[in-house]
Amino acid sequence: MNKKALILIVVLFFLLNVSYIVAENLNMKEGLWKITVTMKIPEMTMQMPAHTFTHCLTKTDYIPLKEEPNEDCKIIKHDVVDNTVIWVIKCRAPEGDVINSGKVTYNGNTFNGIIKIEQEGMKITQKIKGKWIGKCK
């Protein structure tokens, strides 16, 4: 193996481990969370009702999104800065590709954030908040 390839492998290994270490220090209580999402669609004058669901979050699975059936999703980018998690996820759905970019800030047993969804020119902004409610089953 040449020297450049070895250096690249070492740097990539370091960067992946730093991301994990940073997430370990995330001020987030691991367990079952009650997550409430409110949606705002610019083209609609009527407010959509809030959607609530529960999701198990850990320091290795800290993006608070519910997986939908019939979607093939891949995390394009994610980062943890202090207690804020930032992500971009691309999903392939029967209706077309969906880009989901979000940002939440954890504060122990709560979080608040925003999610922006774009699909075929339509843009949706969601506010998201979560509260720790117990241990995962």
Image (cartoon, grey):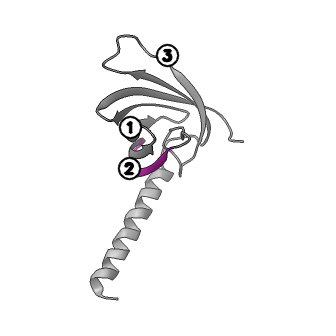
Whether residues under marks 2 and 3 lie with C-beta atoms below 8 angstroms apart, the answer is no
Whether residue 76 is visible here, answered yes or no, is yes
Of 135 and 70, nearer the camera is 70
Q: Report the residue marked by disc 3.
A: 49
- Labels in figure, total: 3
Whether residue 81 is visible here, answered yes or no, is no
Give the residue displayed 27% in from the left and 82% down from the top: 4
**Quick one: quadrant of the C terminus?**
top right
* Mark earlier in primary sequence (1, 2): 2
State how far apart marks 1 and 3 are (Cα).
Answer: 21 Å
Q: What kind of residue is marked 3? A: Pro
* Mark earlier in primary sequence (2, 3): 3
Question: Which contiguous range is marked in magenta?
Answer: 71-84
Give the residue displayed 40% in from the left and 46% down from the top: 89
Which mark identifies residue 79? 2
State the predominant SS element of the stretch in magenta: strand
Kindly give the residue lying farthest to the right in the view shown. 137
Above or below, 30 against 4 in this view is above
Q: 21 left or right of 137?
A: left
| Label 3 element class | loop
Q: Report the residue marked by disc 1.
A: 103
